[in-house]
Image (tube, grey):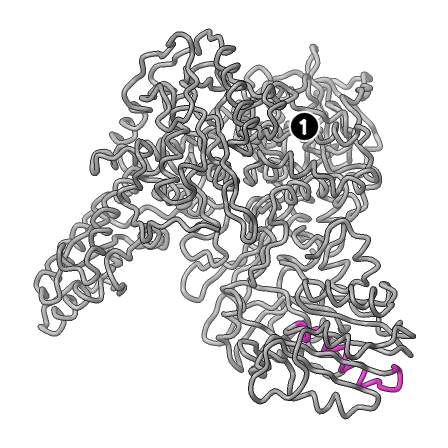
Amino acid sequence: MGKPDPDKKHWLISQSELESWLDGIANARTLIAPRLEAGLLLYRPVTKSDEIAWNRQLPRSSPSGRPVLSVKEIFFPPTEVLFSIKKTGQEIHLAESFPDWETVVFGVRPCDAHGVKLLDALFLDTNPVDSFYARRRENTTLIGLTCQSLESTCFCTSVGGAPDDAHDVDIMLIETDEGFLVEAVTEKGRFLIPGGEWKETTVTHRSSNYAAQFPVPDKDNWPEHFNDDYWSKISERCLSCRACAYVCPTCRCFAVRDETISPGEFERIRCWDACAGENYRRVAGGHKPRAEKGERLRNRFYCKFYYYPEQYGLGTASACTGCGRCIEVCPAGVDITEVLIDLEKPA
Amino acid sequence: MNENPMLPYLGKLVEVRDLASEIKLFRVEMLNGGGEAFKSFQPGQFAFVSAFGLGEAPFGIANSCGRGPTVDFAVARLGSVTTGLHELGEGDMVGVRGPLGNWFPMKKFKGKNLIVLGGGIGGAPLRPVIQHVLDHRADFGTLTILWAARHPSLLVFTEEYNEWRAAPDTYLHLTVDNPDEKWDQNVGLITQLLEKVTPSPENSVTITCGPPIMIHFVTKMLQEKLGFNPKNNYVTLEARMHCGMGKCGRCNLGEKLICVDGPVFNMEEVGGLLETYL
Amino acid sequence: MYEPRIIAFLCSWCSYTGADTAGIARIKSPANIRAIRVPCSGRVSPELVMRAFDQGADGVLVLGCHIGECHYDTGNHRAAKRLPILKSLLTFAGLEPERIRLDWVSASEGDRFSRLAGEFTDSVRALGPVQWRVSHDWKPVPKWNLPATQEVIPYPETDFTAKEDAIRAKARELLANGQVSCVIGYELSRRGRTRPVFIYAPEEANRLVWNQDCTNNLTTYLTGKLRPVKGKEPPKPVAVVVKPCDSKAINVMVAENQYRRDQVYALGVSCEGIQGPDGNLQTRCVTCQEAVPIVCDALISGATSSFIPRLSSYAKEEITKLQDAAPSDRMEFWLEQFDRCIRCYACRQACPMCKCPECLYERDESTFVGLGIRLNEKRTFHLGRAYHLAGRCVGCNECERACPMNIPIGLLNQKLAEEIEAAFDHRAGLAVVPSPIVTVLSGEYKEG
């Protein structure tokens, strides 16, 4: 998805130059940026740059600027119509429609951008290609923004990320005292940059060396803990809701349903689902695998650190971006960092 | 751009008949692009069948490609999609997505003796194996079929038993848990029948399909009592599925997805998995 | 000229026959009425009415037998109790109340049927086409600014050690003498957040804490913990640390035969209140009426009472502001709130009362509401869930606290609690009494 920009140009722009650039983008395309809504920071469409929640306006719920939901919902929305169905007598007519508008997402945090990369492995790089995700991905440009501080729940540095990692965006912005340093990471990003009166600079941004907060077990260390009774112990407080999976940048389980619009008219939709639910694997005959909460919670962690990486060829990386949202939203205090630290300890 | 892989082909029901109590056989004639997609499919593969407006569900393809070009599905009425399918008749349209999944390695089985064990509607995905062997009889050794059900009314494909028995070197053994007055054959679980038949592991492979608990006890007996090497015991597993193509994540058995790494597995693979299918 | 589409639920024994009588006698009735025959008006559940509006009905008319004449004795009593509560809920969500009507027509009253049908159709016609279902790409224009609670009370300086020690001592004692198999309480996680903990041995009692962040309603875990498992020994009693609001949930669940009173040992803590994320008292605490737990086997109280005088009704100003607004404004308010919902079900799972093995709003057949994470469905889920909690919700407000998207769903529960109290003089959880709008078919608790 991202051919590197061969020119490797950098610019230094002011806040007002940034704002008028974004205003221009919003006029021609759909611009999505972090916005305040009901005291929450969310990636939402904006029509003007003054609707964006800038660093000085961050809410108490997100002091470092991490929106409650990741950018996953832009490429893999909570509900997607796969096709519509019209039934007249014995005749069936199916019709599809695909998303085709150009979108620019501004203010993408490195953890979220990395989440998109991880979803690419599933939706794009593994056959069959998902046509909805592919179209949205092709029509979207990501403008990243480095984090100036970490939330208490962030741990991207422990899973191979960094608050200023520019790998997975098309353009990276770094807020400095002199203004915004703009780096074109890919050709797609370069295309969006007006250049023109912007001041070019030779100052480049080098991703700082961040130490991991704590060591994370290798993928191959997970199988030996599968039958530990650790999982049923830590899952007692789990409520089997789906908050963690829905705010996660990489959780991708979905359900497929037919919904009735009117007699003879239906839609087949797919919508978010999560393995935490008790009836997630229940079959029509009544058999219910993973009936125990411990089995379900274990599946979520194993999928993140072992199954998904195995299935979709992530090498040594995990499917966790260390964004920490799951820790923040869990109503019952389940903490993924505790699990990672505990698994690293000798038995 | 790419085709939408979730869009099904349309298929017309050319035959709908009762197979057993609350189990029907649907014979589908694939239309348009579906004919091309289903020109060749292997024993063990499955497809999603849509009752439009209600949903779709995965079903094992119940015939061999050689007996096509129509595609057979055996459907037990258990939930909303299967009830919707049961209400359809000849001439009605369904959606079909597939063929999906992996298949029984029939090439590897050439020259071997095959033991096929089917429990209840689990027999349906085994029928293509039986048909394939019968249509290429000289390529395989003996074919021993152990067919079980809870009650005679739940035995599937009864009208084909004579064809199976009539083939050379082919043996059919039936058993039911609860007989009716007319039943004159074995009574008991399939494991008891297996103990009676005692197939030899010499140059043999087994293929088992049925409820998880049956697969468990049958494969246990095959390995512990009859001396089979687990890598010669093949099974076809199932789980709740929504996409069937390795995207939605639902059907995982530990690190494997039943829809793309299966549904056919051998027991050596299954034994190495983190999760059990039980 | 728009002609309203009216769905009329008519009971087989009386009103449907009454409609027939009108027809046979050639008394004219409006053609707008689409009749759905039900065995009894008591069958008309709120899901059916909401489904009708979700699918575009302009009005819903429910006609049953006269009170005292129901073929099933008390079926129409159910309708008489439930439908006005549903109506007040849908009105609160922005539907005009004149679009729902419940009345009584006997089999011989053809005239009456025709008159009621005509009157209802006329009044719905006058309202204009219904604005209820929204298109999938409806987007809110954020404009509502609810006040935070009318009085923000900062969390007072409090010394928790006495209560914390008492909880630990009691837990130690209960586990040591085998009276309970488990104590459900609060602990501090490694990153310092207060969260539920399950302890099984007396030595673990020192993990228990008591502080301003003990927000979870721990009774939600009781149903799972006390569920009998076939073939296994009946579960041993469980102790649970409860605040006054939490403890009321035990009464509700015992009344509904989810578990027995003697299976629960309530470690009741008299509570100063719980802190919200902004450092102030949580809104439910601002209006709390009960300082001492209602259900209590051992009372953990502080040396001095630091009970702060409370306001009489939770979120009164917010509810009043909504009620005073025009229906369309009210509707837009709720649509704006539900637009943020992601249907994660944190609200439902946190609730001690939401324990249906399969939630009605998540059934595969999706009969009453679709499974899509879309605005119409999300609203129906929340309204339906609030209705299912009417007379059962004890106001712990954990649903709202658990919501990651800041949706003020507690307002729905509070509004219905007010309606139930006004109509039935009932407040959930003060005694072992089921909700007045719930029909209990069998009172026997079965073992194993």
Q: Chain of mark 1?
A: A
Which region of the structure is painted magenta? B122-141
Asked if residue B129 is among those painted magenta in the image, a careful observer would answer: yes
Q: Position of residue B249 (x, y in %)?
A: 67, 50
**Is the magenta region chiefly helix, strand or loop?**
helix
Give the x, y percent position of residue C181: 55, 34
* Residue C125 pos. (x, y %): 20, 52
- Residue C57 vertical position relative to residue A23 in the rendered view, above or below: below
Specify whether C429 is left or right of B127: left
Can residue A104 be seen?
no
Q: In screen coordinates, is C361 left or right of A230?
A: left
**C200 left or right of A1 in image:** left
The residue lying toward the viewer, choosing from A271 and A74, is A271
What residue is pinned by disc 1? Answer: A109
Asked if one can make out residue A45 in the rendered structure from this viewpoint, the answer is yes
Q: Quadrant of residue C11?
A: bottom left
The three-letter code of the residue at mark 1 reads Arg
C63 sits to left or right of B11: left
The picture quadrant where one finds residue B37 is bottom right
Tag 1 secondary structure: loop
Residue C297 x/y as whole percent? 41, 26
Q: Residue at x 39, y 43 (%)?
A: C385
Residue drawn at 56 percent across, 28 percent down: C175
Q: Residues within 10 Å of mark 1 (few under 14, many from 20)?
A: many
Q: Nearer the viewer, residue C222 or C115?
A: C222
Identify the residue at horizontal 33%, vertical 49% (top origin): C443
